[in-house]
Amino acid sequence: MFIDTHIATLWAMREQERTFTSRSEKGHVDLPRAQEADLLCGFFTGFPTESHFITEKMLAEWLRWTRDPENKLVRIRNFKDLERLEERRKSQRQSEKEIGAVLCLEGAAGIDSELNLLEIYYEIGLRSMGLTWNEENQFATGQAQGNGRGLTAEGRNLVARMEELGIIVDVSHLNDTSFWNLMDIVTKPVIASHSNVRELANHPRNLTKEMVEAIHSTGGTIGINFYKGFLETDPEKADINSIIRMFEAVINIADTKTAHIGADLDGCTLPPDLKDITDVPKVLDKVKEELSLTNQDMERIRTGNVKRVMRQVWE
Ligand SMILES: [Zn+2]
């Protein structure tokens, strides 16, 4: 069982003209494959939210998708929801398994500076959000814009209100200046929902050693991204071993309380030796074996680290 903090299936299903309920050869995640992989809960994002029109469209799609009982998705809005799901899962056979779904946004550009929409989206169930995708917006600056500008005054207000309400702050996609501005003001654990380590794969979407340490110091955790372009500086060299090395790097810089799965399934190109979500158990087994981790370490990486952040931020 595991939690993944960044899955882009909603977007991929539309692009690839497939449904969630039937097993497809396309993309990385559908219900049968999530059940086979034993996914407990996903942070299911729609698509980058560069305007409020896109945000509203995505939220409506997400609500329709998670309301349809055939999809066997369970909205996770508080820690109790997850505990109840985990309890039910113990007696569910593979084809009966329900999958937890956390509503998250990849970027806050669709939210007004007065934060009126934030209040509404929280009520709908928003529980995790990045401040930007790759763009610059009213709150912060994404990694594709260089490091000139960081967090704005509106961005500081947004972060404070997210922490008050209980919405996890996601640092993936921020530029370096925004990241460090954010670190100066956060009082709760943050996550990098889908980011790797820059020393191993030199890309501005990845985190420096100092950033990994800073996330660790908040009590947060880093979702290791399976996108081949963030696994190796030369993406053609990426394979399952690159993923193991990313886990190793985070564990060496911080500890086993600071890493989990944030594979960017249905939003990325996987290394050629991985097919889809059904390969995640194989990755986790290899992490345990090659890094000589204990069952307790693995319990943290599979679910425990994200659960800790959920509990501390949501409650
Ligand atoms: Zn992303």
Image (cartoon, rainbow, N blue to C red):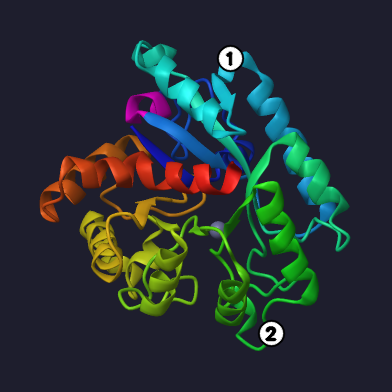
Q: Give the residue displayed 34% in from the left and 75% down from the top.
A: 233
Q: Nearer the viewer, residue 173 or 163?
A: 163
Q: Quadrant of the C terminus?
A: top right
- Label placed on residue 70: 1
> Is residue 312 inside the magenta stretch?
no
Is 125 placed left or right of 87 in the picture?
right
Give SS at disc 1.
helix
Give SS at disc 2.
loop
| Relative image position of residue 12 (x, y in whole percent) | 57, 42
| Relative image position of residue 65 (x, y in whole percent) | 66, 27
Three-letter residue code for mark 2? Arg
Position of residue 64 relative to residue 106, above or below, is above
Position of residue 95 relative to residue 276, above or below, is above
Three-letter residue code for mark 1? Glu
Q: Is residue 108 visible?
A: yes
Q: Nearer the viewer, residue 226 or 157?
A: 157
- Magenta residue span: 33-38
Q: Is mark 2 within 8 Å of ligand 1?
A: no
Q: Label 2, on which residue?
A: 149
Residue 93 lies in what quarter of the image? top left
Is 53 placed left or right of 189 in the picture?
right
